[in-house]
Amino acid sequence: RITSNDQTLFGLPYADDLSDSFQSGDEENGIYTNNIKNEINGNWISAPTSSSSIHEARLKAKAKRRLRKTSSRDSGRGDSLSDNGDVSRGTNGTVPPTSPKSKLLDRKSRAGKGRGLPKKGGAGGKGVWGPPGEVYDLEEVDVKDPNYDEAQESCVYATVVPPLEEGDFEKTITPIVQEYFEHGDTNEVAELLAELNLGSMSSGVPVLAVSLALEAKASHRELTSRLLTYLCGRVLSHKDVESSFDKLLRELPDLVLDTPGAAQLVGQFIARAVRDKILSKSYLDGYKGRVDCVHARAALDRAAVLLKMRMDGLRVDKVWGAGGGQRPVTQLVKEMTLLLKEYILSGDNQEAERCLRELEVPHFHHEFVYEAVVMVLESKGEKTLKMVLQLLKFLWVSSVITVDQMRRGYERVYMDIAEINIDVPRAYFILEHFVDKSFSAGFICENLRDLCPSRGRKRFVSEGDGGRFKLESY
């Protein structure tokens, strides 16, 4: 049992001063102050002699707690308290505050270093060979490398394209030619063919292109002739072109089965090739007296006739005509007017339909409707009105002229009727009569008929009418 004397002797605290709090360093040294609590909110104070010092200690502890609640970025800047409790910036002479427990697993730096830029300037990470813009020099060959081979120094690396197989030739070339019929860019076709290793099958390109053009439109045949001229000397040689036309003449009996006029068309291709100087002028002379096939003889005769039509073959340049979208508008209007005049003389609806299709301008058929209605307004008899009405109905039933093109043609006449009336005084009356007939035939709608303009004139009738006036359209 320890008595009071023993407590005094060994420096132990009295029973009244026992508590559950941990001993400080002063207690371990035997120094203890009775009835004075020298800890506030976990912060030890050195000399709490008055209430004012206790208040200051509480304010400092509150400031510390506020700093601990700041963001990780702000805490990384080195905000801390000095020994006397003042808030200071930076890490010089101060100890950076420890991270709060809520940020224990946060990997962001709190040392105040860096600006958030990528690690190693973007040169780090998997699959990265260095920072952007870095240029690597050629690596020198190490002679002492155990994998060193003397043959590597004289080795030349090149991309080798395997030759195109015969079975894949048609599957590869056909889409290229068909796309060319849509865009008409010969340079693109030449680049695509240059990437292929055609080898001995290069002469098959003109054969395939001409075979596809025989079943296509006249504009596509014109594009094919231009393509052959462009490829000769770049991708094809003159010998390839000659051998391809030889093959076409041999295959004419099979081509005629699918295209009855193949012999005449191949003859036109040969004439155009001679005119474009991708075939020699002596090409036709080499076949004289040596052709047994009827179709081949017809093709060669057609080519010879075309080349003799005019000096230097000036007519051969337009053997296919110009494609619809490539013709000037004035030329299209002139051809449509000639088509209508020929129809008035012949009365052949099917021939007029065929000529209109060959123009290949479905987007410009409203001009044909406009010219037809104007021709009716300028005519002097009922014959032209009936024939044009019959032709428009025939083209409507055969779907050559669409609803939109028919409507636009009539609306253009409605807009220009005031100017037409200057030259044709009865234009309003004839137009109204023709529109009624068109509506009865069924190729214009009721709304389009109601839009037809009518010119009314106020005039007195006679003295016996008592001075009344009426509206009369004429």
Image (spheres, helix red, strand yellow):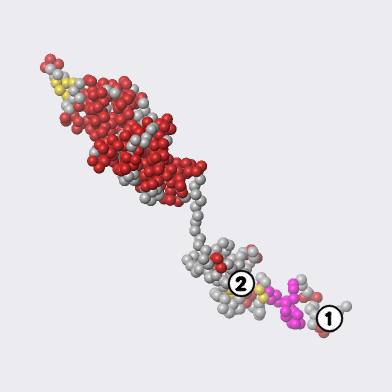
In which quadrant of the rendered image does the N terminus lie? bottom right
According to the picture, the residue beneath numbered tag 2 turns out to be 97
Near-viewer residue (108 or 15)? 108
- Residue tagged by mark 1? 4
Q: Is residue 43 above or below residue 446?
A: below
Distance from disc 1 to disc 2, alpha carbons, whole Å, reads 45 Å
Residue at the bottom extreme, as displayed: 9
Q: Nearer the viewer, residue 135 or 48?
A: 135
* Viewport quadrant of the C terminus: top left
| Number of residue marks | 2
Coordinates of residue 354 in the picture (x, y in percent):
32, 29
Q: Quadrant of residue 57?
A: bottom right
Q: Position of residue 187 (x, y in %)?
A: 38, 49
**Corner quadrant of residue 90:** bottom right
Tell whether 410 sits left or right of 200.
Answer: left
First to last magenta residue range: 21-40
Q: Residue at x 17, y 26 (%)?
A: 425
Q: Quick one: 210 or 77, which is closer to the camera?
A: 210
Q: Relative to 46, does residue 306 appear above or below in the rendering?
A: above
Circle 1 or circle 2, nearest the eye: 2
Q: Residue at x 38, y 48 (%)?
A: 237
- Which residue, as the protein is rendered here, is positioned at the far front? 289
Closer to the chain start, of discs 1 and 2, is: 1
State yes or no: residue 39 in magenta.
yes
Q: Is residue 250 magenta?
A: no
**Amino acid found under the numbered disc labelled 1:** Ser
State the residue at coordinates (14%, 19%).
461
| Amino acid tagged 2 | Pro
39 sits left or right of 342 in the view? right
**Along the line of sight, which residue is nearer the eye, 465 or 425?**
425
Q: Is residue 89 left or right of residue 266?
A: right
